[in-house]
Image: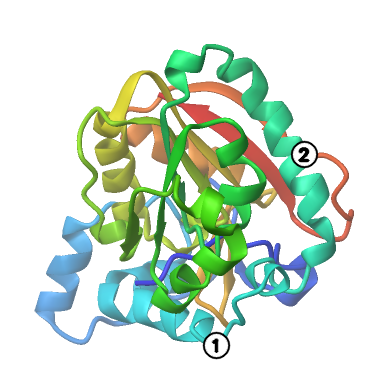
Amino acid sequence: WYQRRVRANYFIQSNLSTMSTENVSPNVTTPTPANDEDEEKKGEMEFVVRNARVVDYMSDREGWYSHSKTYWSTVPSTVDGMLGGYGSLTFSDLASSAQFLAPLYKDPANCTLALDCGAGIGRVTKGLLLNIFNKVEMIDTCQEHLDSAKEYLGDELYARVPAQHCCGLEDFNPREGVYDLVWIQWVIIYLSDYDFIALLERFKKSLRPGGYIVIKDNVCRNGSELDEQDRSVTRSDYQLKQIFKKAGCNVLIDTFQKDFPKELFKVKYYALR
């Protein structure tokens, strides 16, 4: 696995491939499984995407995550690196996120601890979460990026990071009842449907009373779009809400990010419980 730290490559749609639409069978022949064991493994997994190639990739769990992990291990530990070359968007991104969270966290009693998923060097930890929460834990699959967080955050802010977890979200088992917010930005594109659903089920249990899971990520108009370069998949709003439903999560608020370039994917917020 590799599911990205704060991923703002946003995948210009014309450069992506393999698109499918809901309720329509894709015009792609399902690859023949290598053996009966592979076919049985697929049958045990749960898929929301309706794209044969994506399903085939996700069925190879180790390959799915190792591909993107290898890709992102070459990314520099800078804001521009974390944003896939779109470092100029960081201000509008963080300002919009702050506006989204403001009405959800008016009570200081609900601002004790947040988890920054795909934290990288701590761009969102520093520019958003530590402005609201007393402490923020960071999780990322790349140790090099996490190691860069101390310098990027500075000693004073870094002292408010009680833990860094170096692992993929698909393998992360959070403690129950500890987080006021689980922030997941530009990360779910690297999760298989099966692991995405299971992760949300675990994160629901990790919330304190009044807490939220907030997802901020790319959405496409229909179906799903696969990026072969880093092995990520962008889902439609419909597919994402199907995953939320299967995980037993209710969507309390959903809205679009504003003021991003029109040629890029739409970015949407979802506040879940």
Task: Residue 250: give its label.
Answer: none
Position of the C terminus by quadrant: top left
State how the image is colored.
rainbow
| Residue 77 pos. (x, y %) | 59, 76
243 or 24, nearer to the observer: 243
Looking at the image, which residue is at 77% across and 39% down? 95
Indicate the amino acid at tag 2: Ala
Q: Secondary structure at mark 1?
A: loop
| Residue 152 pos. (x, y %) | 61, 65
**For this view, does 99 lie left or right of residue 64?**
right
| Residue 170 pos. (x, y %) | 29, 58
- Mark 1 closeness class: few <14, some 14–19, many ≥20 residues within 10 Å: few
Whether residue 30 is visible to the viewer of this picture, yes or no, is no
| Residue 10 pos. (x, y %) | 70, 62
Instruction: Measure the C-alpha gap from mark 2 to mark 1.
Output: 28 Å
Indicate the amino acid at tag 1: Thr
Q: Label 1 belongs to which residue?
A: 74
Whether residue 72 is visible to the viewer of this picture, yes or no, is yes
- Asked if 108 appears above or below 159 in the picture, the reply is above
**For this view, does 194 lie left or right of residue 102?**
left
Q: Earlier in the sequence, mark 2 or mark 1?
A: 1
Q: Label 2 belongs to which residue?
A: 95
Looking at the image, which residue is at 43% across and 15% down? 109
Position of the N terminus by quadrant: bottom left
Could you say which quadrant of the image residue 112 lies in? Answer: top left
Looking at the image, which residue is at 14% across and 84% down? 35
Could you say which quadrant of the image residue 135 lies in? Answer: top left
- Asked if 221 appears above or below 258 in the picture, the reply is below
- Mark 2 closeness class: few <14, some 14–19, many ≥20 residues within 10 Å: few
